[in-house]
Structure formats: C-alpha cells, structure tokens
Image (cartoon, grey):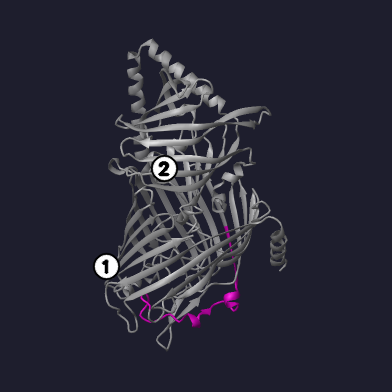
C-alpha cells in the first residue's frame, strides 16, 4: 500500500520541480544574479554559525491569546551540531506540571524528513512520531516545529530582494522558498544583519501566500566558543524570539535564560533510549 | 546484597555535600458511573476514588547516579480490591554514555500499537486501574542496557512476581465469579519467588524502529480456574516467548507490527497486532491534527483465547487540538470479526491552568456470545471523569 503512495508523492514533487525549471527561462539575468546573491549571503550566514558543536539552554515560552491572556511553560533544550546534516535536538519540558518529564528528540535532516521521538513519562513509553507534523504548532505555541529546526542552506531557494535598515542595523532582505513539500509556508522573508549575518526578523507566508506571522529576534548576545579546530569563534544567540500570528492575533515569546556551549554533550546523549533518562 | 549497602552509603555520603532532590507528582479524584444497573449481586453503580502518586528523585555524581521513588495509592468508595497501593518505582539508576544499570523496582514499556499491548511483558497489568491495561505494577529488576551504534541490548533479571489485580465482589468490570486473588497458585514450586529473565535488542535505522525480545518466566496473564466456592482461582504458569515490535515511519504514515510466539505449559501459539496510523496534519486549514488508526488483532487460539483480541479489527481516530491546553480526543472501536462483539472507547483530555488536568474516559461493550470475554462486561458501559492536580 505504502509504496505506490510514496512514489506518487515523490512523482508529484518531481513534477513540481520540473515545472519550476521550465519557468526559469522567463527569469531575467538580473533575477538569477539576485538568486546567487541571496544564496551567497545565506551560505555566509551558515558559515558564521558553524562550529559551535553543542549547546544547552533553559527557556521560558509565553503564549498570549487574542484576548491578551498569557500562559507560560518552561523547557530545556540540548543541541548537537551535526556536520553535513541537520542538527540533533532534545527538548525536556518542566512545566506545565502534567507534562513534566516529557522529552522530545529530533534529528533534523537536510534532504529527508526529520526523525522525531517523544517520551511519555506516565506510560514510560518512547514513541516515534510522524515527521509530517513540521508545519504543526510546537507545544500549542505560534512556533511550528520547522521554525525551531536547524537552519541548513539546502532547505530553501533564495532571492536577494533589497537593503533595509532595522533598528539601526543595515540588513539584506532575502526571500526563502522552502524546498520541502511538507513545509507549511509558501515563502519566508528574512532580514539579515550585514555586520554579523544574524537574522533580525522573518516573515512567514502561508501556503496561500498570505502573510501568516512575523518573528522578531532581539537581545542578541555574543558567545566566545572554542571550536573543534581549536580557535575561538564568536556565535550570536538571540535571547528573545517573539512571533506574532497576524491571522489569529495570538503571539508567543521565547525567552532564553541561560545559553551554555561546550557542555560535553555527545552523540550518545541524543540516543533515543536516553529519552527516558531526560530530566 | 552489597548494592543496597552501596546505595545507602552513597546517599548518606552525599547528604553532607551537594545533592539534588526533586519532588513532583499528582493527586486525583475520579468518578466512575455505570450506565446500566449491575448484573451481579453486591455490585454498585457508582464509584468515587482518590489517587496519590508522588515521585521523589535524588541525584548525585553529576546526575550519573540517581534514586527514584514513586509510590502510588488509590482509595475507592466501592471496591476494596480497587483500593490498593503499589510501589511503581524504587530504584537506583547508574548512567554512562554507552551503558546503564538500574536496580530496584521499575516499569518498562515495550511496543508500538495502540489497541492492545501484546509484547509488553516485563510488568504485570494493574487491571483495576484502567480498562485498556495501560497501568502497570512495579516490577523488581536488575536491568542492564548496552547502548551501541548497532542498537541497544537490554538484559533483565526479574526476581519476584507481581500478581494481577482483579475487581472485587462489589466492583464492576469483572467476571461473573469473583477472582480470589488470595488463592493464586503457580506451576513453579518457587511460586512468586521464581526468577524470570528477559533480553531485548532494539534499534532505530532511518525510518525503522525495530525491537526483538525474548522472555522466560511466569506468565503475567493467569488462567482463571473455577473453584467449589464459586470463585475463580488465578493459576500462573511458566512460559517462554519471543516477540518483535516494528514501526516504520514514512511521513504521515506510521506502520506498526507487534507479534509473538509463546510456549506455555500445555500449548504454544502465535499472536499479532498489525496496522497503521495516518495523520492529517492541519486538518482543513486548522491547527488540528487528525490521526486515523486501523489495527488488526489476531490470536492463533481463536475463540479459545482468553483475550477479546483474537480476530478483531480496531478502528480509531485521534484528534490533537494543538492548543495551549494540550487537548486530545481519541475515539476507537474494536469489532470482533467472528462473532457479534465489540468495545468502543472515547478518551478526552485537557489542561486547566498550570496544575490541573481533566481526563474523560467512556467505554461501551457489546457481546451476544456467552463464551466471549467481553460478554461479562456487556452491562458495564461507563463514563469516568478524573480531575488531577499536578505538583
């Protein structure tokens, strides 16, 4: 049963790609220059954020509904940089208290669906979950799973749009078209700070091309991290991420309380059997 | 014998220095009401109960060592057998990157399917707790795990056996004759002291999550023998089984299989559950995810099987609201394909604020065949509402 369906989906994806290629000749040389420029900027963005190896952070997530009522939850995230593929991440929930001890493990991939497992402490059960949910809300928030997965260059096609100034920072505005057929977005527009190649803002457009939400990164902090090559490199992390959903009026704030690098995490800490030990 | 001493030593030596202790848990109140009047004498139609389950966690040695203690108690207004307590966990855990060791009482879950937990054999089912057997009794164990690139090996030595719980004379959801748990008998002369063992290899390879296991020891499911006093006597035989559980995850499709071969005292048989869960993400442009479940349950013993899942199809639907209260709703129907018999379930859950969770469970049972295990439950359709406070 599954084979024909997978093949069908794959076929549809290929068809989608070939139509895009056919449309290409219509694009002027300037447009392809903009694509190359967009790609170069995003490659540099990735290069500057490569080499941090592993990190841990505690964070608070504040959910605000359209009526302005807020609720908060606390979690911890552990991340492992994987060379040549998407990163591995482990999230452990501390509140709300009925889900305390729930752990979410994700291996993101550049060219295939992410692998995800959930540990349910009440049943002591580790469950492999569908990776199809990447467009779905993370923990009932306005963040989708895909918003929190690691940035990898091949996930999108890029186009440089213009320059703009945001809060005193000169930025490049880049359009990102997701390659993944399961992405919940038709496009993303990112404002990249020209000095440090940090993302300051991203706008998400839904599959019908309507503006869905705006994510603003603020309170950037620089961390000096010893890379595997032995040199000290600066990595920037935003302490505050605010996403506003323009269609529902809801918003979510992620507040990072503590970022630590080189905490000794290894691949072994991200084995699915370790999920039941997450605390 | 040296190990408990070591735990005591390690614990006491850490009291002076820095050690971490955490407490969490829940207190719940549950009301269970039955739609039809009782079919057997002494049974009631309503039961109210209180539950308490704290968890204490001490860690030392930079969390490489920990002691976890989780007692559980339920006080029930109707059924003295449902009023019970258990130690769910009381174990020392030692963690390394490539191996782990736990000693004490614990709970281990194996399996992937939803309609029944066929291969999950380490722990005894606490049958008075839930209809679908989700709740287990703590099992004494020494458990060693080896975690390698080629998979995880879990080895268990299981000294001490836990008897299954059964509803008492006044309780619902029981056989016509009450199971007299004080009269349990065993094939093994070692009785409850028989030492069981189990071995499991599990691995995650791309889309595939695979487990292969073997278990030898006291069967968790007793044979119920009628006695002269019009009660049933649980008889626990020795058994040996091999089992596998496999899940293949292809985007919105989860393909699931649990299968076993079991050698008992007088017979051997095979059984399986196989099916899929298909998820519609963002149903009709909403935040909702709708999962569609289909599982086929088969048991080689056919109508002689003591389980209702001998040739049954389970159809279910799971709705995840993806809201801030983590609301979910599961509706399922298990239909026997050989005789007129089915069970239906509705399970809903949502959160209030930071501390409260509400669970609603409703079950209905139908059977026309007196030999069917569901026949005894045909008047036990009920709804149960539980409100739990988490701390």
Q: Are marks 1 and 2 on the same chain?
A: yes
Please name the residue shown 51% across and 43% down the image.
A59
Residue B232 has which mark?
none
What chain does mark 1 sit on? B
As for residue B197 lying within the magenta part, the answer is: yes
The answer to whether B345 appears left or right of B194 in the picture is left
**Circle 2 sits in a helix, a strand or a loop, which is it?**
strand
Give the image location of residue B17, x and y in percent.
71, 56
Q: Is residue A233 above or below residue B77?
A: above
Of residues A216 and B105, the one nearer the viewer is A216
Please name the residue shown 43% across and 36% down the image.
A242
Give the quadrant of the N terminus of chain B. bottom right
The region drawn magenta spans B171-199
Residue that protrudes farthest toward the top in the picture = A29
Q: Is residue B264 above or below residue B40?
A: above
Where does label 2 land, which residue? B250
- Residue B141 occupies quadrant: bottom right
Give the image location of residue B299, x and y in percent.
40, 64
Give the image location of residue A75, x and y in percent.
50, 47
Where does label 1 land, which residue? B340
What chain does mark 2 sit on? B
Which numbered disc, 1 or 2, marks the residue that appears first in the sequence?
Answer: 2
Label 1, label 2: how many angstroms apart (C-alpha)?
A: 35 Å
Q: Is residue B199 above or below residue B251?
A: below
Of residues B93 and B242, the one nearer the viewer is B93
Give the image location of residue B41, x and y in percent.
33, 84
Picture mark count: 2
């Amino acid at each position: 049963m599954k084979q024909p369906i997978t093949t069908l989906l794959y076929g549809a994806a290929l068809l989608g790609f070939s139509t895009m290629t056919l449309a290409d000749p219509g694009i002027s040389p300037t447009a392809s220059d903009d694509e190359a420029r967009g790609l170069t900027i995003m490659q540099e963005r990735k290069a500057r954020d490569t080499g941090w190896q592993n990190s841990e952070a505690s964070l608070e997530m504040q959910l605000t509904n359209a009526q302005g009522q807020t609720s908060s939850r606390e979690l911890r995230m552990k991340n492992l940089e994987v060379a040549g593929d998407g990163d591995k991440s482990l999230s452990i929930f501390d509140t709300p208290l009925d889900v305390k001890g729930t752990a979410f493990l994700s291996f993101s991939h550049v060219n295939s669906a992410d692998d995800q497992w959930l540990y349910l402490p009440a049943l002591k059960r580790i469950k492999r979950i569908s990776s199809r949910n990447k467009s779905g809300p993370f923990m009932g928030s306005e963040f989708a799973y895909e918003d929190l997965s690691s940035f990898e260059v091949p996930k999108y096609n890029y186009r440089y749009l213009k320059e703009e100034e945001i809060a005193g920072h000169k930025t490049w505005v880049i359009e990102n078209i997701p390659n993944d057929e399961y992405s919940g977005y038709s496009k993303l527009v990112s404002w990249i700070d020209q000095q440090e190649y940090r993302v300051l803002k991203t706008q998400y457009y839904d599959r019908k091309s309507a503006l869905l939400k705006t994510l603003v990164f603020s309170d950037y902090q620089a961390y000096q991290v010893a890379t595997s090559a032995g040199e000290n490199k600066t990595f920037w992390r935003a302490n505050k991420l605010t996403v506003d959903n323009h269609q529902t009026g809801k918003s979510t704030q992620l507040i990072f309380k503590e970022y630590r690098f080189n905490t000794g995490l290894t691949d072994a800490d991200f084995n699915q059997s370790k999920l039941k030990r997450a605390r | 014998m040296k190990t408990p001493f070591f735990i005591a030593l390690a614990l006491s030596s850490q009291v002076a220095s820095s050690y971490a202790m955490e407490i969490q848990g829940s207190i719940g109140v549950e009301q269970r009401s039955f739609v039809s009047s009782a079919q057997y004498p002494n049974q009631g139609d309503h039961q109210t109960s209180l539950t308490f389950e704290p968890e204490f966690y001490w860690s030392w040695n930079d969390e490489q060592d920990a002691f976890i203690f989780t007692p559980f108690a339920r006080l029930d207004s109707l059924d003295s057998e449902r009023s019970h307590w258990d130690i769910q966990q009381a174990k020392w855990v030692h963690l390394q990157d490539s191996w782990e060791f736990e000693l004490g009482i614990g709970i281990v879950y194996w399996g992937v399917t939803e309609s029944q937990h066929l291969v999950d054999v380490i722990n005894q089912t606490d049958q008075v707790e839930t209809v679908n057997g989700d709740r287990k009794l703590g099992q004494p164990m020494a458990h060693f795990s080896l975690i390698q690139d080629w998979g995880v090996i879990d080895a268990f030595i299981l000294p001490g056996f836990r008897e299954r719980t059964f509803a008492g004379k006044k309780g619902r959801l029981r056989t016509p004759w009450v199971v007299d748990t004080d009269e349990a008998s065993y094939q093994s002369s070692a009785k409850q002291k028989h030492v069981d063992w189990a071995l499991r290899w599990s691995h995650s390879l791309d889309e595939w999550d695979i487990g292969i296991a073997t278990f030898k020891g006291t069967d968790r499911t007793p044979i119920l023998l009628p006695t002269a006093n019009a009660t049933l006597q649980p008889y626990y035989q020795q058994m040996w089984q091999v089992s596998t559980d496999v899940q293949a995850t292809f985007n919105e499709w989860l393909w699931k299989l649990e299968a076993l071969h079991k050698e008992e005292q007088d017979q051997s048989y095979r059984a399986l559950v196989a099916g899929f869960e298909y998820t519609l993400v963002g149903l009709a442009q909403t935040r909702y995810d709708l999962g569609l479940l289909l599982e086929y349950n088969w048991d080689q013993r056919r109508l002689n099987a003591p389980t209702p899942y001998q040739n049954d199809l389970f159809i279910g639907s799971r709705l995840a609201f993806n809201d801030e209260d983590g609301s979910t709703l599961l509706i399922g129907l298990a239909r026997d394909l050989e005789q007129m018999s089915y069970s239906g379930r509705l399970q809903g859950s949502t959160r209030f604020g930071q501390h409260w969770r509400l669970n609603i469970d409703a079950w209905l049972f139908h059977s026309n065949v007196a030999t069917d295990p569901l026949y005894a439950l045909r008047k036990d359709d009920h709804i149960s509402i539980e409100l739990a406070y988490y701390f």
